[in-house]
Amino acid sequence: MENNRFFPEVHGKLGFGCMRLPMNGDKVDLPQFAAMVDRFLEQGFNYFDTAHVYLGGQSETALRQCLTSRYPRSSYILTDKLTGNCFKTEEEIRPLIQEQLEACGVEYFDFLLMHSQHRHNYDKFKACRAYETAFALKAEGKVRHVGISFHDSPEMLDRILTDYPELEVVQIQFNYLDYENPNVQSRAVYEVLERHQKPVLIMEPVKGGTLVELPEDAQKVFDGLQGGSNASYAVRFAAGFPQVAVVLSGMSNLEQIEDNTGFMKEFQPLSDQEQEAVKQVREIYLEQNSIACTACRYCVDGCPRKILIPDLFHAMNMKKVFRDWGQDEKYAELTKEHGKASACIRCGQCERICPQHLPIRDLLQQVAGVFEKE
């Protein structure tokens, strides 16, 4: 396996995204996560990505228990993020970062990213001098590289990189389904990064699992290749772009570790035949008109009616795209102790925080129309 051409300390182009860890009830399954960490490192990879808000704070502490307390600091690369909802003033940022360092059990972060930058929170980060604080922490040795994770338009990204040209890396959502998506604009955002010559970190290469579980017609296309897994085509599609440094995979079991490390250990870009298959799968999927939710769950915590929005969207997709009629019973279970889709008061909090820029309020009306007919 070759070292990363952008960051030589990073081994390979596959990163372990720690937002969708294995769970035992509402707690991280630490023995299973430790086994996954062990296997990921055994296979030669070393990049881990977390955030203070992932899994209600459990992601950071799980990394301390399963990674940082068990391996020497030089054996892994750790990325954490500064989340806007976690601070209100400039004075709160340093104590917050120190809290995150302690939660992870490390003295420095290899990468610190300004989390989920977009037009609605960027002015707050600027007013609180978050970027300047991050650069100061780098000078002090608390951070090695400073970057951003990003969910907005190409124009907004260009503005941020013009304001802060010293940023070293940008994490974006990028997959073959969103490549020409007018809401996500993956291709146009990537092209801005090419112009600014910034290394790219990829999140959501399989779009929250959407590109693993495919409609029947799409599955037949990949089956015809007689080759890799559905995930392999999605991850390799993203990793094949020249400016990409690392592709994150949010792995939640050992089987996913084995699959992803297997095809990324000796990474090969998609062949012409595979590229054509990906194009066909994209076209088939878009014809299904499914809800493009990645189940990041950012919308759930702030919902005043406690609606499990991603779960209801998944039920809708399973019924509409996969003809799974058992989803009516699933919907009843999901809404037994949480709000139904029709309970939405259209406050808009969910839409302001949605990385996919989905019209959630209107979509919930559609879900209510399908599952609440009686």
Image: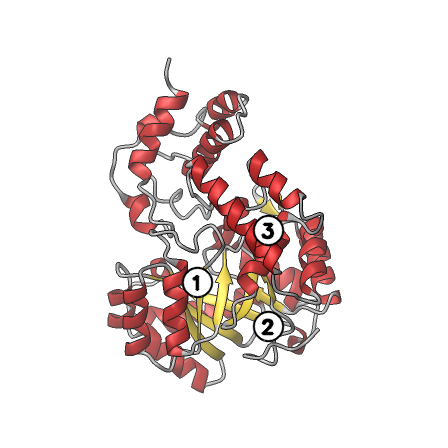
Q: Position of residue 374 (x, y in %)?
A: 37, 13
Position of residue 282 in the picture relative to residue 153 (left or right): right
Crowding at label 2, few (<14), some or many (≥20) Cα neighbours within 10 Å?
some
Q: Residue at x 47, y 22 (%)?
A: 332
Q: Amino acid at mark 1?
A: Ile
Residue assigned mark 3? 21
Label 3: element kind: loop
Residue assigned mark 1? 172
User: Which label's residue is closer to the chain start, 1 or 2?
Assistant: 2
Q: Amino acid at mark 2?
A: Ile
Residue assigned mark 2? 77
Crowding at label 1, few (<14), some or many (≥20) Cα neighbours within 10 Å?
many
Label 1: element kind: strand
| Relative depth, front residue between 333 and 93 | 333
| Relative depth, front residue between 151 and 192 | 192
User: Which label's residue is closer to the chain start, 1 or 3?
Assistant: 3
Q: Residue at x 46, y 72 (%)?
A: 112
Crowding at label 3, few (<14), some or many (≥20) Cα neighbours within 10 Å?
many
Q: Position of residue 48 (x, y in %)?
A: 58, 65
Position of residue 127 in the picture relative to residue 136 (left or right): left
Q: Quadrant of residue 90?
A: bottom left
User: Which label's residue is closer to the chain start, 2 or 3?
Assistant: 3
* Badge nearest the viewer, 1 or 3: 1
